[in-house]
């Protein structure tokens, strides 16, 4: 066990098992104290490497993350405190691993419920190697104005109120972390504040005892008096009694053992801590208080007079000239996190993203204001979901069913088209699903599947301007533009695309108007007079019929229809639909365990 100071203004720690809030609280305390370097040197997160972004005052810093204790210790040889935030299941082995590192002097174990047999092994190893264990079941400790462990002393407001941003003259040790916060406040009211405070933890076998830390405090010149808060149960306080009787403590000790109310109960009572359970008269709060009083400690008659006893002891030391007044300092202002400042209404900040189609902040996600449960309860299909997420409104059922028909008809067109071919080649190269899918999607454009928007745009413009099919087609020819939506490599006048026929049949049956589709058919009649394969293809059919859907539903303005076509909504239908087929081709090649594809040389024209 160390015999003097274990923390300083330059102490740095390694934090095991990443927890954002306690680490940020440590860094905020560092800034409050005017430290030049953060007290957290590194984070150990088993299985992870990299960096974590946190704030050091106004500045955002990156703290390195290591996957092993050994790697962190090797990278930061001056970091000698190990703060263990792991669960009770792994607290013991990880703490033992840290104790075995030559660079680690202090290990703080936060977890409750660590098996007593494991704790005993940690204690034995630490004492044999002159190292300090704080805990288990502890909040940690603090050296005022220098260093603190995790959540010790609570919020910044409490730290400032307790004047923990600068050192005082009092050494404090307790079993309870919660009561430590209370006593820090009490001590700050009636003295110049604490110099160091430790919560040893409430387990039956703490890694270090009350007397261990009192004896340390006795050797620290800056500490002029000590305050001890014990509790019923166990015999830890008696080691302090012996130290007082043997004259090992030369500074005033003000002590109180809580739990005097236990005698009011007819049966034995287990208080909050595992060790707070009296096993006989000797372990009662009354017996311990009496023993401490007889050994020379200042022990009040009740907890209510504890504060008075601390004040009187401090005032006496001041009168004797053993304590000089502390120069008060004004701590810097800690910048408030943006999230909390916004929540409290102190600031307003611009958002970075605008979303109008979905909202996941409530109890369930909403699509265009429609809760997910409503979508399921009403039996909505994929077309209805597209209606909400793409068009921000619930379209009539005939519209959403048309969308679904388009998706089904365009899902795939065999393995020979360019998109499917690319996907198959990529899948056979051993690439993953996303890579195979994207390689196929990247072929979609003006020559493959990407002509729906263009077909709709040109058909609408020509129809709205009243151009005859002759004027439209010949005008496009003069500009050197192929008529999008017209022409097919395989289909012809005598071999019509069945998909186009199915779409047209559905529209004639369900759509209130098919003005744009009829215009597209008139254009087809003219182009077929030029060549047998200049038929209306599926792009042209979907493009013209979607114009009829948008215009005939009465739910879109002319401006909205133009915007939908301009943005690329209609090509989105083909992208969505063809993704289904491309994914299918990827799975097909993986299932068939097809080898790497190599194009046959006899299918290539080699020429100069």
Image (cartoon, rainbow, N blue to C red):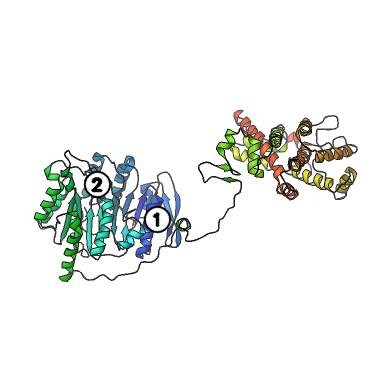
Secondary structure category for the residue under label 2: loop
* Image quarter hosting the C terminus: top right
The image shows residue 605, relative to residue 228, as above or below, that is above
Looking at the image, can residue 383 be seen? yes
Q: Residue at x 44, y 63 (%)?
A: 58
Q: Nearer the viewer, residue 438 or 559?
A: 559
Q: Nearer the viewer, residue 500 or 547?
A: 547
Which percent across, then down, holds residue 450? 73, 42
Looking at the image, can residue 594 be seen? no
Q: Which mark is residue 24?
A: 1
Please give the residue where the numbered disc 2 appears in the rendered image. Answer: 202
Secondary structure category for the residue under label 1: helix
Quarter of the image for residue 86 reads top left
Q: Residues within 10 Å of mark 2 (few under 14, many from 20)?
A: many
The image shows residue 446, relative to residue 224, as above or below, that is above
Is 104 situated left or right of 235 in this image?
A: right
Q: Residue at x 16, y 50 (%)?
A: 237
Is 267 situated left or right of 545 in this image?
A: left
Q: Residues within 10 Å of mark 1 (few under 14, many from 20)?
A: some
> Is the residue under label 1 in contact with that under label 2 (CB below 8 Å)?
no
């Amino acid at each position: 066990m160390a015999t003097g100071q274990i923390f300083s203004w330059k102490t740095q720690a390694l934090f095991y098992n990443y927890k954002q809030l306690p680490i940020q609280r440590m860094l905020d305390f560092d800034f409050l104290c005017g430290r030049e370097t953060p007290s957290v040197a590194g984070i150990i997160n088993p299985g992870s490497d990299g960096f974590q972004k946190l704030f050091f005052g106004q500045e955002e810093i990156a703290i390195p993350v290591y996957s092993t204790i050994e790697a962190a210790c090797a990278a930061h040889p001056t970091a000698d405190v190990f703060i263990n935030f792991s669960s009770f299941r792994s607290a013991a082995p990880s703490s033992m691993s840290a104790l075995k590192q030559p660079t680690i002097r202090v290990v703080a174990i936060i977890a409750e419920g660590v098996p007593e047999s494991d704790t005993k092994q940690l204690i034995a190893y630490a004492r044999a190697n002159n190292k300090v264990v704080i805990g288990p079941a502890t909040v940690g400790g603090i050296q005022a104005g220098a260093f603190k462990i995790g959540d010790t002393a609570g919020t910044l407001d409490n730290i400032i109120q307790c004047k923990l941003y600068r050192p005082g003259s009092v050494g404090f040790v307790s079993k309870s972390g919660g009561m430590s916060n209370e006593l820090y406040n009490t001590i700050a009211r009636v003295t110049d504040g604490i110099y160091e405070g430790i919560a040893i933890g409430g387990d039956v076998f703490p890694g270090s005892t009350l007397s261990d830390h009192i004896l340390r405090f006795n050797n620290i010149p800056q500490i002029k008096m000590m305050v001890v808060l014990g509790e019923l149960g166990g015999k830890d306080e008696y080691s302090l009694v012996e130290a007082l009787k043997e004259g090992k403590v030369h500074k005033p000790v003000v002590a109180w053992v809580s739990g005097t109310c236990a005698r009011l109960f007819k049966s034995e009572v287990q208080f909050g801590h595992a060790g707070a359970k009296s096993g006989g008269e000797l372990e009662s709060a009354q017996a311990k208080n009496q023993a401490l009083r007889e050994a020379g400690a200042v022990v009040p008659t009740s907890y209510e007079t504890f504060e008075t006893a601390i004040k009187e002891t401090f005032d006496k030391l001041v009168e004797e000239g053993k304590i000089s007044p502390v120069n008060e300092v004004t701590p810097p202002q800690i910048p408030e996190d943006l999230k909390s400042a916004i929540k409290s209404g102190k600031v307003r900040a611009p958002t970075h993203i605008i979303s109008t189609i979905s909202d996941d902040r409530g109890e369930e996600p909403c699509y265009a204001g429609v809760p997910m449960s409503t979508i399921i309860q009403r039996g909505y299909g994929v077309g209805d979901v597209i209606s909400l997420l793409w068009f921000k409104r619930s379209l009539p059922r005939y519209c959403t069913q048309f969308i679904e028909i388009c998706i089904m008809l365009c899902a795939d067109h065999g393995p020979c088209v360019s998109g499917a071919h690319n996907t198959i080649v990529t899948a056979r190269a051993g690439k993953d699903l996303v890579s195979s899918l994207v390689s196929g999607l990247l072929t979609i454009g003006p020559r493959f599947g990407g002509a729906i928007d263009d077909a709709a745009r040109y058909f609408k413009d020509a129809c709205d301007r009243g151009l005859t099919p002759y004027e439209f087609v010949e005008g496009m020819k003069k500009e050197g533009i192929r008529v999008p939506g017209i022409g097919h490599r395989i289909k012809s006048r005598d071999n019509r695309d069945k998909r186009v026929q199915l779409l047209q049949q559905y529209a004639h049956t369900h759509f209130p108007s098919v003005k744009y589709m009829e215009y597209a058919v008139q254009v087809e009649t003219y182009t077929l007079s030029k060549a047998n394969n200049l038929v209306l293809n599926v792009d042209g059919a979907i493009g013209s019929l979607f114009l009829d859907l948008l215009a005939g539903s009465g739910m879109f303005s002319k401006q909205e229809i133009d915007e939908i076509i301009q943005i690329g909504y209609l090509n989105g239908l083909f992208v969505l639909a063809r993704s289904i087929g491309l994914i299918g081709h990827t799975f097909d090649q993986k299932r068939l365990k097809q080898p790497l594809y190599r194009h046959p040389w006899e299918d290539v024209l080699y020429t100069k």
